């Protein structure tokens, strides 16, 4: 799996040559080894990509993400045959024991609330209410501490008048960052041969990424942390670049330094191994740095 993100922002034609991606604009030609790529993101609807390029990227397990006219991701490629053991993995997945599912979901919610409290503290807020929700968490979160914590958390981070249902630049940035994070999680799931549709807590028939929506939860606060550190006025290309580059944030995951995108992949592998009965322990511990890089994005953006 590669490590680089390639962002397409303008009218161009994307093809392949000698196992490199070739991007032709009006005045320039850019090439990049396909094996170096983990995702290609189209933020414009005025670009063309060949079927051969899509197939070559799929062979390299690189995602291709397409955005709509509003710049928000609307669809992505998904490999059909990513693992020779796929039939075995699917059989295991649809028969996961309920007690293991409940254990993993409880750990995911605990990690998410803990990380929300950590980020709130890093931003100078009193996180005691979040810690109270964490202390009250029961197996499988039957009392829905996740929702209670979320209500407290977003008010702390973005003000008493803020709502996740608001149409505003802050929510646009959060949603874009979550989409990038979900895509990274889905790629890790597919690489193991598991189905993204079969989730632990999310079970929507209209959501093809139920499992990704579950497993990404502990890392959402990384996006919140970045957005909270900027006074975002609109979802500009710079904001999108910053949120994509957040995948290269160095964090501590389960006691070891790792880039965020690698930590997500390790987290997915750990959770799925536990659910498949191949691991006895499922550990989810995240520590964020004291600040996240703005990469030349300063103050109002």
Image (tube, rainbow, N blue to C red):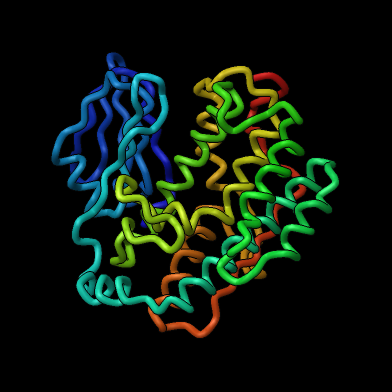
Is 185 drawn above or below residue 23 in the view shown?
Answer: below
Of residue 275 and residue 268, the one placed in the foreground of this image is: 275
> Could you tell whether 23 is left or right of 185 in the image?
left
Of residue 216 and residue 130, the one placed in the foreground of this image is: 130
> Could you tell whether 43 is left or right of 221 in the image?
left
Query: Which residue corresponds to the image point at 30% horizontal and 71% vertical from the top-left?
Result: 94
Query: Which residue corresponds to the image point at 41% horizontal and 83% vertical from the top-left?
Result: 277
Position in image of residue 39 (x %, y %):
37, 44
Query: Which residue corresponds to the image point at 71% horizontal and 44% vertical from the top-left?
Result: 153
Question: Of all residues shown, which one is farthest toward the top?
Answer: 26
Question: Of all residues shown, which one is farthest toward the left?
Answer: 51
Position in image of residue 239 (x %, y %):
56, 27
Query: Which residue corresponds to the image point at 50% horizontal and 41% vertical from the top-left?
Result: 178
Position in image of residue 262 (x %, y %):
50, 58
Q: Quadrant of the N terminus?
A: bottom left
Which quarter of the figure has residue 83?
bottom left
Q: Quadrant of the C terminus?
A: top right
> Could you tell whether 28 is left or right of 148 in the image?
left
Of residue 18 and residue 247, the one placed in the foreground of this image is: 247
């Amino acid at each position: 799996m590669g490590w680089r993100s390639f962002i397409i922002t303008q009218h161009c034609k994307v093809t392949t040559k000698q196992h490199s991606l070739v991007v032709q604009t009006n005045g320039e030609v850019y090439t990049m080894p396909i094996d170096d790529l983990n995702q290609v993101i189209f933020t414009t609807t005025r670009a063309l990509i060949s079927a051969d390029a899509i197939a070559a990227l799929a062979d390299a397990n690189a995602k291709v993400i397409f955005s709509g006219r509003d710049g928000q991701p609307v669809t992505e490629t998904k490999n059909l045959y990513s693992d020779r053991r796929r039939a075995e993995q699917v059989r295991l997945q649809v028969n996961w024991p309920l007690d293991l599912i409940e254990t993993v979901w409880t750990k995911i919610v605990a990690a998410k609330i803990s990380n929300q409290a950590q980020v709130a503290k890093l931003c100078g807020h009193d996180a005691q209410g979040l810690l109270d929700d964490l202390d009250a968490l029961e197996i499988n979160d039957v009392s829905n501490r996740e929702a209670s914590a979320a209500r407290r958390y977003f008010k702390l981070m973005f003000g008493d008048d803020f709502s996740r249902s608001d149409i505003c630049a802050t929510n646009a940035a959060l949603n874009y960052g979550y989409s990038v994070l979900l895509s990274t999680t889905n790629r890790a799931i597919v690489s193991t041969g598991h189905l993204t549709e079969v989730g632990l807590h999310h079970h929507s028939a209209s959501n093809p990424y139920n499992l990704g929506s579950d497993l990404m939860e502990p890392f959402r606060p990384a996006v919140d942390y970045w957005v909270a550190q900027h006074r975002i006025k609109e979802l500009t290309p710079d904001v999108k670049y910053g949120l994509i580059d957040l995948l290269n944030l160095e964090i501590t995951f389960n006691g070891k330094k790792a880039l965020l995108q690698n930590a997500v992949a390790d987290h997915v592998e750990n959770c799925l191994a536990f659910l498949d009965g191949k691991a006895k322990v499922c550990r989810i511990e995240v520590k964020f740095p004291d600040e996240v890089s703005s990469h030349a994005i300063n103050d109002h953006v």
